[in-house]
Image (cartoon, grey):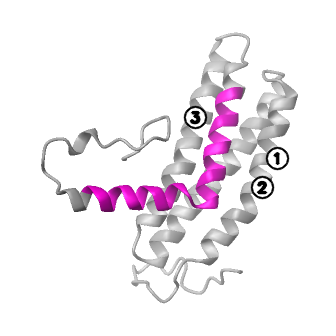
């Protein structure tokens, strides 16, 4: 990806003079467009909350370490899924990535519930995470409603062939 862990654009890979100035500018414009999508802005906010939650873990036992690793994995899947869907040309590919985003968010909710049950994190932080995810859902639904159904290619699976996307 062209984004580092701090959500900043990372263009070091282009310093080998393989890309023209215009190509680099196009990549930066696309990065800016995706970064400014409401669904991506909220994904970054969810990342910030997850980061704050794992920083509050009082110990570094196996369970806390596991939760930290899995939560960061799901936040990366959330952000990467948005980028991949935006990069996809066909409706089915966009929807496949959208499903991965949805699953990552659902996993974060399950991890939040586990942290709450195990009393591993500050309940107020967990409430903030739940609220951020609740705010993410309508943004997600609006985002997928913008996918162009007319631009698709039959992949033989027919997974999203008769799916209505609500606007």
* Alpha carbon separation for disc pair 1 and 2: 6 Å
Name the residue tied to disc 1: 131
What is the secondary structure assignment of the residue under circle 1? helix
Q: Is residue 31 above or below residue 164?
A: above
| Residue mark closest to the camera, 3 vs 1 | 1
CA neighbours of label 1 inside 10 A, class few (<14), some (14 to 19), many (20+): few
Secondary structure mostly seen in magenta is helix
Q: Is residue 139 above or below residue 146?
A: above
Nearer to us in this view, 42 or 123: 42
CA neighbours of label 3 inside 10 A, class few (<14), some (14 to 19), many (20+): some
Q: Is residue 86 above or below residue 112?
A: below
Quadrant of the rendered image containing residue 39 = bottom right
Name the residue tied to disc 3: 72
Mark 3 or 1, nearer chain start: 3
Q: Position of residue 162 (x, y in %)?
A: 59, 87
As for residue 9 lying within the magenta part, the answer is no
What is the secondary structure assignment of the residue under circle 2? helix
Mark 1 and mark 2 residues within 8 Å of each other at the beta carbon: yes
Q: Residue at horizontal 59%, vertical 55%?
A: 40
Magenta-tinted stretch: 24-52
Q: Residue at horizontal 69%, vertical 69%?
A: 141
Q: Position of residue 132 (x, y in %)?
A: 76, 47
Name the residue tied to disc 2: 135
Q: Position of residue 38 (x, y in %)?
A: 64, 60
Quadrant of the rendered image containing residue 56 = top right
| Residue mark closest to the camera, 3 vs 2 | 2
């Amino acid at each position: 990806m062209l984004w580092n862990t701090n959500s900043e654009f990372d263009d070091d890979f282009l310093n080998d003079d393989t890309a023209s100035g215009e190509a680099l500018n196009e990549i930066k414009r696309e990065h800016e467009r995706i970064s400014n999508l409401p669904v991506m802005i909220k994904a970054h906010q969810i990342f910030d909350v997850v980061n704050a939650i794992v920083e509050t873990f009082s110990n570094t036992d196996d369970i806390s370490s596991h939760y930290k690793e899995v939560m960061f994995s799901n936040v990366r899947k959330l952000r990467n899924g948005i980028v991949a869907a935006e990069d996809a040309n066909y409706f089915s590919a966009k929807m496949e990535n959208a499903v991965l985003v949805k699953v990552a968010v659902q996993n974060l909710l399950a991890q939040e519930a586990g942290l709450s049950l195990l009393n591993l994190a500050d309940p107020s932080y967990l409430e903030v995470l739940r609220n951020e995810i609740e705010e993410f859902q309508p943004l997600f639904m609006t985002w997928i409603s913008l996918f162009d159904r007319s631009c698709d290619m039959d992949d033989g699976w027919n997974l999203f062939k008769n799916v209505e996307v609500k606007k």
